[in-house]
Image: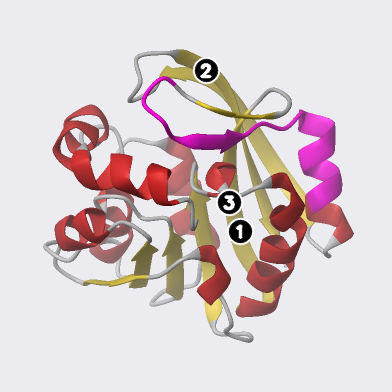
């Protein structure tokens, strides 16, 4: 993510974001399944880690966690979790090759422009070891827009997201659907897809 307005919102509203999200992660069945899909002691990337609550669950499960986010305030929060190595980076900084056993992209890539998503997914695919686990969650819809607090979003249909993933080599494994309250106070439908490289 490189949209300055979006990053500024997360820097200014980091505490509010923690209050909304911190309690839910350890019980998230998607996160439990992601951890289970990774080998013991796996090296994983939390891409767009936010305050690091998902990364903390991964670390508690014995995974070696590399957590990245474009927001300096989110990185400061994520760095406080034991076992989590957090650094400030954007999607454009994904340049590893066959390093990660798993990559978790939970509602982060939805801030990328549509024109860039395939490039980012290809970089994620390269960064994963063969058969590495990948989980992506996105809001459902169409087009690109800013929400009421100024964050940039790109929305996808389920079929479009499937096509984006398979076109760069991912094998789709499982999916979940839901809806939830966002930081801007709106309710959005979402999809998460589990895949492997």
Secondary structure found at label 3: strand
**Rendering coords of residue 57 (x, y %):** 28, 54
88 on left or right of 127: left
Residue beneath the point at 24% across and 54% down: 74
Residue holding disc 1: 134
Q: Nearer the viewer, mark 2 or mark 3?
A: 2
Q: Magenta stretch containing residue 151, yes or no?
A: yes
Name above or below for residue 142 compared with residue 86: above
Snapshot quadrant of residue 190? top right
- Residue 195 % position (x, y): 69, 54
Taking depth in this image into account, of 141 and 158 the one nearest to the observer is: 141
**Span highlighted in magenta in the image:** 148-164
The numbered mark at residue 38 is none
**Who is closer to the viewer here, 168 or 113?**
113
Q: Are marks 1 and 3 in contact (CB under 8 Å)?
A: yes
Marks 1 and 3, how far apart in space?
A: 4 Å
| Percent of width and height locating residue 145 | 59, 28
User: In front: mark 2 or mark 1?
Assistant: 2
Which residue position is annotated with label 2? 188
Above or below, 196 against 191 in this view is: below
Crowd tier of the residue under label 3, counting other residues whose Cα lies within 10 Å: few below 14, some 14–19, many 20 or above: many
Dot 2 or dot 3, earlier in sequence: 3
Is 169 placed above or below 181 here?
below
Residue corresponding to mark 3: 135
Q: What residue do we see at 27% from left, 33% from top?
A: 21
């Amino acid at each position: 993510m490189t949209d300055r307005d979006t990053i500024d919102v997360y820097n200014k509203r980091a505490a509010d974001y923690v209050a909304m999200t911190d309690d839910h992660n350890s019980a998230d069945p998607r996160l439990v399944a992601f951890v289970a899909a990774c080998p013991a002691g796996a090296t994983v990337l939390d891409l767009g880690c936010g305050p690091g609550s998902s990364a903390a669950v991964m670390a508690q499960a014995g995974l070696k966690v590399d957590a990245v986010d474009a927001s300096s305030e989110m990185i400061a929060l994520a760095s406080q979790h034991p076992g989590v190595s957090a650094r400030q980076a954007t999607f454009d900084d994904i340049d590893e090759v066959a390093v990660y056993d798993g990559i978790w992209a939970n509602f982060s890539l939805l801030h990328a422009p549509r024109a860039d998503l395939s490039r980012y997914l290809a970089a994620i695919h390269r960064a994963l070891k063969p058969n590495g686990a990948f989980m992506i969650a996105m809001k459902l819809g169409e087009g690109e827009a800013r929400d009421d607090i100024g964050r940039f979003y790109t929305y996808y249909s389920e079929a479009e997201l499937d096509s984006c993933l398979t076109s760069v080599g991912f094998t789709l494994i499982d999916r979940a659907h839901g809806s939830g309250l966002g930081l801007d106070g709106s309710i959005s439908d979402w999809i998460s897809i589990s895949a492997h490289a």
